[in-house]
Image: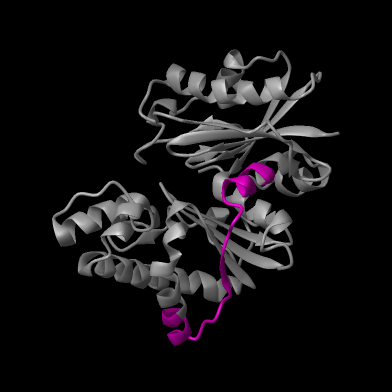
């Protein structure tokens, strides 16, 4: 059995699991998760991450070299493992911290190798291997949650430098309206916009859904309009066979997806949409694939730094 640990680092939690790289199946009783205070000090964040990963390490047979693949949000230098979190409301105390140099100090193993892939890319790779995107050649995978993640997948490989994908192979940092896309396609936009239109404070999209009033309908309609305005040129350029949605906001897709599809159709675009049921499992599998020799050879020289 070729065992790799996959780790999904979220804005408010971390999940770790052992994966059989030969079958791309998660090994039973190896998955652990915990909430994370992303405003904590560097040492406390790394201790919190390691406490979860160490539980997974203890759940697998003893091996000489522990391999850990990370699904990591940006901004991050994925080739070197240097965290560049700044002005994005999470993990800012890790700014300019080398994760390969610092995290192993807290891990219960003496020999460890770490590799990193963007979290949305990991999700896209996972759904292309095991999920609804398995039988599609060109896929745009989008994660809607604490931040706005995206990846452009071709035959299971995330594309970063192709002419038909945006710079860096991602969308979160691209300009939109008075800011960047991450400002408009994330939980904080829903919270901010709902407060503006209703004068009521909510914690997240789930509460917006639960209100189910004229204000929530207005917010979801604006979200749909923004999504179509922003995504249209990228869809036109990449011509995906499938667009896969993931992340917590995708749980509310009944409130916006049909509107998005209709508006795109008005623009002459009819991409197939689906909402992933794999969710976090996809990112774990995608990150573990960093230790598949053929996959690694395809991506190692094309890892984004942003």
Determine if the magenta segment contains residue 1. Answer: no
Q: Residue at x 24, y 49 (%)?
A: 202
In the picture shown, does residue 59 fall above or below 139?
above
In the picture shown, does residue 38 fall above or below 204?
above
What segment carries the magenta color?
262-285
In the picture shown, does residue 203 fall above or below 137?
above
The answer to which image quadrant residue 2 occupies is: top right
Q: Which residue is more in the foreground, 129 or 275? A: 275
The answer to which image quadrant residue 227 occupies is: bottom left
Q: Is residue 219 visible?
A: yes
Q: Which residue is more in the foreground, 298 or 111? A: 111
Residue that lies at the very extreme toward the left in this rendered image = 199
Q: Residue at x 45, y 71 (%)?
A: 257
Q: How many marks?
A: 0
Q: Residue at x 28, y 46 (%)?
A: 203
Q: Position of residue 8 (x, y in %)?
A: 57, 38
Q: Is residue 84 visible?
A: no
Please give left or right for residue 204 compared with residue 49 in the image. Answer: left
Q: Position of residue 213 (x, y in %)?
A: 23, 66
- Which part of the image, by quadrant, shows the N terminus? top right
Q: Residue at x 66, y 56 (%)?
A: 127
In the picture shown, does residue 88 fall above or below 80?
below
């Amino acid at each position: 059995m070729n065992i790799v640990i996959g780790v999904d680092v979220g804005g408010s939690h971390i999940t770790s699991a052992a994966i059989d790289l030969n079958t791309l199946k998660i090994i039973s009783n190896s998955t652990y998760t915990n909430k994370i205070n992303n405003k904590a000090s560097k040492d406390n964040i790394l201790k919190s991450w390691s406490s979860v990963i160490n539980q997974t390490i203890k759940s697998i047979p003893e091996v000489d070299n522990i391999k850990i693949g990370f699904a990591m949000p940006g901004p991050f230098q994925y080739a070197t493992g240097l965290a560049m979190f700044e002005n994005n409301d999470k993990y800012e105390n890790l700014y300019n911290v080398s994760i390969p140099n610092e995290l192993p100090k807290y891990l219960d193993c003496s020999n460890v190798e770490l590799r990193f892939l963007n979290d949305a890319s990991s999700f896209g790779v996972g759904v292309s291997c095991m999920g609804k995107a398995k039988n599609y050649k060109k896929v745009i995978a989008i994660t809607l949650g604490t931040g706005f993640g995206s990846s452009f997948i071709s035959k299971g490989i995330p594309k970063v430098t192709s002419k038909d994908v945006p710079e860096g192979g991602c969308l979160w940092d691209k300009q939109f309206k008075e800011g960047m896309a991450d400002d408009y396609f994330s939980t904080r936009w829903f919270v901010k916009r709902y407060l503006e239109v209703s004068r009521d404070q909510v914690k997240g999209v789930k509460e917006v859904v639960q209100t189910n009033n004229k204000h929530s309908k207005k917010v979801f309609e604006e979200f749909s309009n923004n999504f179509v305005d922003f995504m249209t040129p990228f869809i036109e350029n990449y011509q995906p066979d499938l667009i896969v949605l993931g992340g917590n906001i995708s749980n509310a897709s009944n409130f916006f997806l049909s509107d998005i599809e209709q508006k795109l159709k008005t623009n002459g675009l009819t991409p197939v949409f689906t909402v992933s049921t794999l969710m976090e499992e996809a990112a774990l599998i995608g990150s573990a694939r960093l230790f598949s020799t053929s996959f690694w050879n395809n991506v190692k020289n094309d890892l984004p730094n942003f």
